[in-house]
Amino acid sequence: MAQDENLAAVVSNAAQDIGSFIRAQREAAQVSVRQLAEKAGVSNPYLSQIERGLRKPSADVLNQIAKALRVSAEVLYVRAGILEPSEPSEVRDAIVNDVSITERQKQVLLDIYTSFRQQNEAAGEPEGPAAIPSPDEEPATD
């Protein structure tokens, strides 16, 4: 019984956390609840319940809200407890925190960065800075 109550408390906290985060993002974008609900394709009362932590949205609904807010769905999934946070990355943090580019541009940069890392891992290339020859250096020949 106590385990069920603990699980209910965790779910409730996750719902409040994602709800307050969505509200903060909506307010930062200067969009009303009604406008966001319309853009996300959900009802106004349902979105209001999500923001107040009374409802925990599905991954599908979070994706719709993310698109409407122009934020990464991954960020909402992590906040909602659907996804585990990814490993820390200075590059990822710099992109996400850059206020001079749009959310769409951030997502494109993150997608490119992730694909490069995956390609390098698949090719067995070591992580870290590679030696880049200066323009006046002759390339090494093997």
Image (cartoon, grey):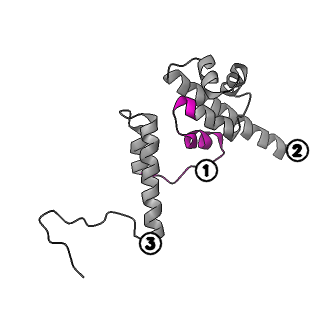
Per the image, label 3 sits on a secondary structure element best described as loop
Q: Type of residue at label 2?
A: Met
First reached walking from the N terminus: tag 1 or tag 3: 1
Mark 1, residues whose alpha carbon is within 10 Å: few (<14), some, or many (≥20)? few
Give percent across and percent down for residue 31: 54, 19
Asked whether 140 falls inside the magenta stretch, the response is: no
The residue identified by callout 2 is 1
Precedes in sequence: disc 2 or disc 1 = 2
Circle 3 Cα neighbour tier, 10 Å, few/some/many (<14 / 14–19 / ≥20): few
The earlier-in-sequence mark between 3 and 2 is 2
Residue type for callout 1: Glu
Q: Quadrant of residue 17?
A: top right
Q: Nearer the viewer, mark 1 or mark 3?
A: 3
> What residue is drawn where x is 46% and y is 56%?
115
Real-space CA distance between mark 3 and mark 2, rounded to the nearest whole angstrom? 49 Å
Quarter occupied by residue 15: top right
Residue lying at the far right in this picture: please name it: 1
Q: CA distance from mark 2 to mark 1?
A: 27 Å
Decide if residue 26 is on the left or right side of residue 135.
right
Q: Nearer the viewer, mark 2 or mark 1?
A: 1
- Which image quadrant: the N terminus? top right
Asked if residue 54 lies left or right of residue 64, the reply is right
Which stretch appears magenta? 67-89
Q: Is label 2 in contact with label 1 (beta carbons under 8 Å)? A: no
